[in-house]
Amino acid sequence: MEKWMEQLQNSVNTLRRLKEFINVTSEEEKAITDLDTKWGTTPYFASLMARDDPDCPVRRQVVPSMKEKENRYGIPNYLIWKENRATDEVRPDSIARQYYDRIAFTVTDMCANYCRHCFRKELVVDRDLKLRFDVEEGLAWIREHEEIRDVLITGGDPFILSDDKIEHLIRKLREIPHIEMIRFGTRTPIVLPHRITDGLKKTLSPYHKVPIWVNTQCNHPKEITEKTAQAVYGLLCCGVNVGNQAVLLKGINDDVKTFRELHQKLLSVRIRPYYVFYCEPAPGIDHFRTPVEKGAELIRDAIRGHTTGLAQPMYVIATNIGKIPLVPDYYIVNKTEKEYTLKNYKGEVTTLPNIPE
Ligand code: SF4
């Protein structure tokens, strides 16, 4: 059996197994016993957890918490609202749409790590929402909609599917004349790097005019290992670019030092920081959420000007009407008919002529 399948088969998803990796606190044990929720991770990712620190950034993403019962700010039926599933447009369950020319194609509700902060929690983790993942039905819908040029294959985690299923998806999408690009959203380079096998690389690698992009999710520098670096290099060698979509998580990556280190370390393993998402108002994840401005402040205080420009992600709030970018607002201090006054990250000021149209 391939190593990635062994990792999934030996998933750390019982109290007994978890105790092999960490000293479980009474609060954690109560959450595991009392909450009706799917949880678990790979032995590989579990081995990154600190044995005696319940605040360990990896551990908080893996182990359920009683705080998931609290819900002051979460929107009920969040995914129905967020993914515009209650509109007049008739679409298969597998198709989520917020934009004219691109869609998210949900092909599974299985993951290698059931992230406690997941915005698809209702579907993937708590399983109150049931959707049909009929790949053929989704493909037929995409075929009929000529305005769709970009398909994001998501889940759950689509790289949990077999090589054959992934190959089928890619081949069928590439047969559709209006598809210009295919994207995969997968946490496997971070939580299950063993998944980037020779077989998968063969599936992804032949040159084709319809490129494949991968975006992963890494939220803390501790999640980046040599295994991740190797997996990412493997993807790049077969022509697949790898970006990161972090989630801004309170107590995990919302301080200047961690935020900068995360984005620098991503570049060091050839992952391009792409987005940082505000932690969405899905139910049961209030304890991970920061004030909205926090992400823009972190870009101002930790990244812009402070380190390599390539390390700068775009900070966005994902909503039912699409992503709203939020940028630090200090750059333009003043604007007159004659000139702009601009400020840099150190507070230094300069001017630029204001050119009329
Ligand atoms: S891998 Fe993605 S879909 Fe799966 S639980 Fe984590 S955030 Fe949610």
Image: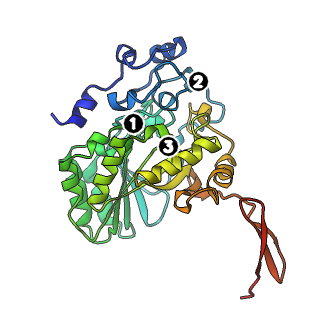
Q: Label 3: how many residues lie within 10 Å, few (<14), some (14-19) or many (20+)?
A: many
What residue is pinned by disc 1? 130
The quadrant the C terminus occupies is bottom right
Residue 284 percent coordinates (x, y): 56, 30
| Viewer-nearest residue: 77 or 124 | 124
Relative placement, left or right, of 281 versus 163 is right
Residue 291 percent coordinates (x, y): 69, 42
Q: Classify 49 as above or below 222.
A: above
**Label whose residue precedes the other's in the sequence (2 or 1):** 2
**Label whose residue precedes the other's in the sequence (3 or 2):** 2
The residue that appears at 75% across and 87% down in the rendered structure is: 356
Mark 2 or 1: in front is 2
Tag 2: amino acid: Lys
Q: What secondary structure is found at the residue carrying circle 3?
A: helix
Q: Marks 1 and 3, Cα distance to the nearest angstrom?
A: 11 Å
What residue is pinned by disc 2? 67
Tag 1: amino acid: Lys
Which label is found at residue 79?
3
Mark 3 or 2: in front is 2
Q: Is mark 3 within 8 Å of ligand 1?
A: no
Relative placement, left or right, of 330 versus 238 is right
